[in-house]
Amino acid sequence: MKEGGKNMKCLAYVAIFIVFQIIVITIFALTVMKVKGPKVRFQTVTIQNFNSGSASSPSFSMDLVTKFAVKNPNFGQFKYSNSTVTILYGGQAIGSADVPSQKAKLKSTRRTDITISINSDKLSGNTTLASDFVSGVLNLTSECTLKGKVELLKIMKKNKSGNMNCTISLNLSTKSVQNFMCK
Ligand SMILES: *[C@@H]1O[C@H](CO)[C@@H](O)[C@H](O)[C@H]1NC(C)=O
Ligand SMILES: *[C@@H]1O[C@H](CO)[C@@H](O)[C@H](O)[C@H]1NC(C)=O
Ligand SMILES: *[C@@H]1O[C@H](CO)[C@@H](O)[C@H](O)[C@H]1NC(C)=O
Ligand SMILES: *[C@@H]1O[C@H](CO)[C@@H](O)[C@H](O)[C@H]1NC(C)=O
Ligand SMILES: *[C@@H]1O[C@H](CO)[C@@H](O)[C@H](O)[C@H]1NC(C)=O
Ligand SMILES: *[C@@H]1O[C@H](CO)[C@@H](O)[C@H](O)[C@H]1NC(C)=O
């Protein structure tokens, strides 16, 4: 075999190796190193200590017993600061609870039991409440912003946050959650 041919072959191997490396690095960059925000939602919601008035004098108070879930889609842990989860009726906050700071391990969901006491004290001027008592369904929404950081390979840290946006429908006659959905 000629020297030239050998060199060409060697160069070809180097070129193939470089292309292969670029592909590997690109795949790595697009999957493992890609940092996404966490999904924040309620996994379960149940009602305790339910008290309510009637359509002629609409009022309520209860505890929402929830499993608060933070799903971390990254290949590194997500560490978040303490926060607050708020329940609203027609855009008006009617109760809130603390969310403790925690860590969600890589590719996993961190669940925390959180109970939120709510009542209609702040809704006394709202006429929609009476019609909800007639229809028998009370719609609530929840909000929470979790701020934290994703740690990749212990060296790279990136700030990320997640927002909760759930709607909860309560059945006033069964005193239970009829339907809930999180975005
Ligand atoms: C987080 O905790 C600190 C100290 O306990 C407190 O001052 C702060 O208000 C909390 N933040 C939220 C969003 O609850
Ligand atoms: C009453 O609640 C409804 C939603 O059920 C909301 O659209 C409206 O803004 C509220 N009104 C007041 C005065 O808070
Ligand atoms: C409340 O729940 C009961 C029993 O499941 C059901 O029959 C009723 O239709 C519900 N009320 C509303 C307003 O959906
Ligand atoms: C409450 O939410 C349900 C869906 O969960 C919806 O079908 C219904 O129209 C809502 N009622 C009111 C008064 O907004
Ligand atoms: C990340 O968030 C922390 C507070 O949690 C803040 O001190 C820091 O400046 C932020 N870093 C960037 C790059 O935004
Ligand atoms: C929550 O989702 C609803 C639609 O389901 C949207 O109209 C609303 O703006 C969202 N709220 C926040 C705070 O993102």
Image: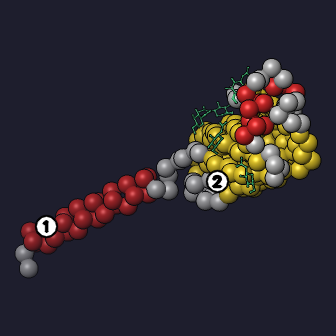
- Residue at 8%, 68% (x, y): give it: 4
Q: Which of 132 and 145 is in front in this view?
A: 132
Q: In the picture provided, is 132 more to the left or to the right than 163?
A: right
Q: In the picture provided, is 138 more to the left or to the right than 120?
A: left
Please name the amino acid that badge 2 sits on. Lys
Q: In the picture provided, is 117 more to the left or to the right than 132?
A: right
Residue 1 locus on image (x, y percent): 8, 79
- Residue at 49%, 49% (x, y): give it: 34
Q: Mark 1 points at which residue?
A: 8
Residue 6 in view, yes or no: yes
Disc 1 Cβ-to-ligand 5 distance below 8 Å:
no
- Residue at 54%, 47% (x, y): give it: 36
Which class describes the residues within 10 Å of circle 2: few (<14), some (14-19), or many (20+)?
A: many
Label annotation for residue 121: none
Which class describes the residues within 10 Å of circle 1: few (<14), some (14-19), or many (20+)?
A: few
**Helix or strand or loop: what does disc 2 sit on?**
strand
Q: Mark 2 points at which residue?
A: 71
Residue 145 locus on image (x, y percent): 68, 36
Single out the residue that lies furthest toward the top: 125
Q: Quadrant of residue 14?
A: bottom left
Please name the amino acid that badge 1 sits on. Met
- Residue at 59%, 45% (x, y): give it: 183
User: Distance of mark 2 from mark 1, alpha carbons?
Assistant: 51 Å
Disc 2 Cβ-to-ligand 6 distance below 8 Å:
no
